[in-house]
Amino acid sequence: QDLMSYFASQLHVTIGELRADGLFSLNNTSCSGICDQGPAGLVNGHALTHLDPVRVDAIVILIYQQVPIAQWPA
């Protein structure tokens, strides 16, 4: 949960809500089947595994730079 809160703070969004500009939402989800690679998450169906604050920072940069998800590192 601490990592989720960190992700939310980096995106300036409240967990469970759409950001005021409509660009992002961040929500908890049920099991995605990748718990053996956790902490993990999904962005538009793209699995993000082995998350930590450094990886979250890199993901946030990709999001703000509007890099297509297909070009994100695994």
Image (cartoon, rainbow, N blue to C red):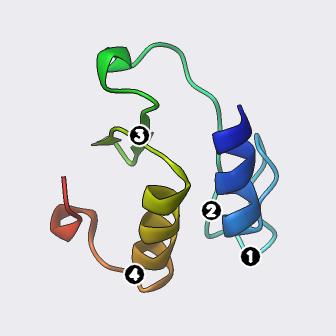
- How busy is the neighbourhood of tag 4: few (under 14 within 10 Å), some, or many (20 plus)? few
Describe the element under mark 3 as helix, strand or loop.
Answer: strand
State the separation of the CA atoms marked 4 and 2.
12 Å
Residue depicted at 17% across the width and 63% down the height: 70
Foreground pick, 28 / 6: 6
State the separation of the CA atoms marked 4 and 1.
15 Å
Q: How many marks?
A: 4
Describe the element under mark 1 as helix, strand or loop.
Answer: loop
Residue depicted at 41% across the width and 40% down the height: 42
State which tag comes first along the sequence, 4 or 2.
2
> The disc labelled 4 sits on which kind of residue?
Gln
Residue depicted at 42% across the width and 86% down the height: 65
Provide the residue designation for mark 1: 21
Instruction: Answer whether labels 4 and 1 touch (C-beta < 8 Å).
Output: no
State the separation of the CA atoms marked 1 and 3.
21 Å
State the separation of the CA atoms marked 2 and 3.
13 Å
State the separation of the CA atoms marked 2 and 1.
8 Å
Provide the residue designation for mark 2: 24
> The disc labelled 2 sits on which kind of residue?
Phe
State which tag comes first along the sequence, 2 or 3.
2
Percent across and percent down for residue 25 are 65, 53
Provide the residue designation for mark 4: 66
Between circles 2 and 3, the one closer to the viewer is: 3
State which tag comes first along the sequence, 1 or 3.
1
Between circles 4 and 1, the one closer to the viewer is: 4
Percent across and percent down for residue 36 are 31, 16
> The disc labelled 3 sits on which kind of residue?
Leu
Provide the residue designation for mark 3: 42
Q: Is residue 27 above or below residue 53?
A: above
Instruction: Answer whether labels 4 and 2 touch (C-beta < 8 Å).
Output: no
